[in-house]
Image (cartoon, rainbow, N blue to C red):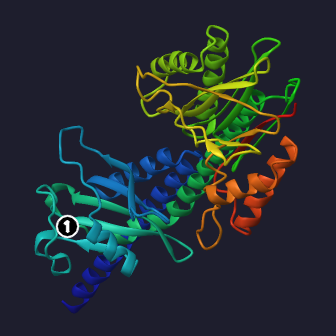
Amino acid sequence: MAEDTGQASAIENLEEENRRLRRALEELSIINDLGRAISASLDPHNIMSTVVRRSLRAIGAEQGVITLVAEQSSDSMKTLVRTWDDSGDQEHFHLHQTLLGWMQLNRKPLTVSDPRTDSRFKGVRWGESIRSLLCVPMMIRSELKGVLTLYNKKGGAEFTAEDQRLLAIIAGQSAQVIENARLNEQEKQLLLMQEEMAMASRIQRGLLPERIPEFAGYDIAGKSIPAQVVGGDYFDFIRIDGDRLAFCLGDVSGKGVPASLLMANVQATLRGQTFLTSSAAECIGRSNRLLYRSTSPDKFVTLFYGILNRTDHTLQFSNAGQDQPFLVSRERSPVRLSTGGVALSVLDEFAFEEETISLEVGDLVVVYSDGIPEAHNAANQHYGEVALRELLLQHREASATEIIDRIVSAVREHAASVPQMDDMTVVVVKRQR
């Protein structure tokens, strides 16, 4: 009898060992197949979808999700892949914030057989269809990169310790592959962005004047210094005829290629309308209507536009929401040129106003973008329009180019170690005789 009992026990142990070996071989096959499948792709979404699908099949769960932990973001988690193996309609599960917090704190596998009665998650509102869950961290060098979660073991069973161990192995093997794919994707996006910025920069450089036009009796200069590779400021000179020269300075909303395209649209529109009317206000009004109808609602342009006439030495201008330029004279205090109206492309119809002023010998008009007065230092103090006004009074006898150089130098000296935050653009028109 004892001999029979011993033989039965030995057979039982042998069967158990065979079962463990078969299970180990199955797991090894699952891991090897998964490794080959995910190593063949560089798309993080495809890789994560593959991991989720194969995890569902290996563990026998109804639904799974990979949640990647966001870095340096107010949103501490971001679900990138949610996959389930049931084609029928069902509630789409996601990782609860409390569960993520537990995982960030403990960083170890978690099995919950009955979420509603689990003392670790009191007060958490679970989806009605969630019966159980298995959650494992995706770690890279002790840093939590994501969480792999499976919901509802098929057939109403509970997740086992073997399920937990296998899913932890899958998560461990997948984490670095997913991270590498993410980094590759980020690098491609960065390269694409850099190419886009370079293209936008080429477009914008091509829109700015190659050289300043010569206009008898006047000293004229213009300069634009972008804060980034691509700026939003714009200036231009348009020779109407032998005695009239139009000039403008503006700031288009947005950055990158969209801003460059808007800037090109502004230039083409203004140049076209300049030759159709001798009125600054009418040119601005027509341009506004065209831009309003050809740009999206969130786009707009602030612009100062003037027509300089050397026969009678007058400047006719209209200011569409641009910083008010200074008119600096020898005989009177500086005057601000504000007549005009709202920014372009804000309203379909707007009655822009214009003003005509006379320019005496030595008078200078200084048009600038908000990057000049709003430049700030480490104490967050702006350079300001008062300082700009005093600088213009002090150096009004200098040439147009020298005045621009002194403005830029003064702003940079004020900002000191603080990087340039906005584009700086200046146009100076000075009557010489």
Q: Amino acid at mark 1?
A: Glu
Please give left or right for residue 352 compared with residue 264 in the image: left
Q: Position of residue 208 (x, y in %)?
A: 76, 31
Please give left or right for residue 55 compared with residue 240 in the image: left
Please give left or right for residue 339 compared with residue 372 in the image: left
Q: Nearer the viewer, residue 361 or 319?
A: 361
Q: Position of residue 85 (x, y in %)?
A: 28, 45
- Location of residue 360 (image quadrant): top right
Please give left or right for residue 127 compared with residue 320 in the image: left
Q: Tell me if residue 407 comes above or below residue 313 in the rendering.
A: below
Query: Which residue appears at 70% of the width and 65% of the height?
Result: 415
Q: Nearer the viewer, residue 343 or 130?
A: 343
In the picture of the structure, the residue carrying the numbered disc 1 is 158
Q: Position of residue 46 (x, y in %)?
A: 48, 44
Question: Is residue 335 shown to the viewer in this render?
Answer: yes
SS under mark 1: loop
In this rendering, the count of numbered labels is: 1
Query: Which residue appears at 73% of the width and 37% of the height?
Result: 201
From the image, which quarter does the C terminus lie in? top right
Q: Position of residue 226 (x, y in %)?
A: 71, 46
From the image, which quarter does the N terminus lie in? bottom left
Q: Nearer the viewer, residue 119 or 267?
A: 267
Query: Which residue appears at 47% of the width and 17% of the height?
Result: 289
Q: Tell me if residue 221 comes above or below residue 374 in the rendering.
A: above
Q: Residue furthest front?
A: 331
- Location of residue 421 (image quadrant): bottom right
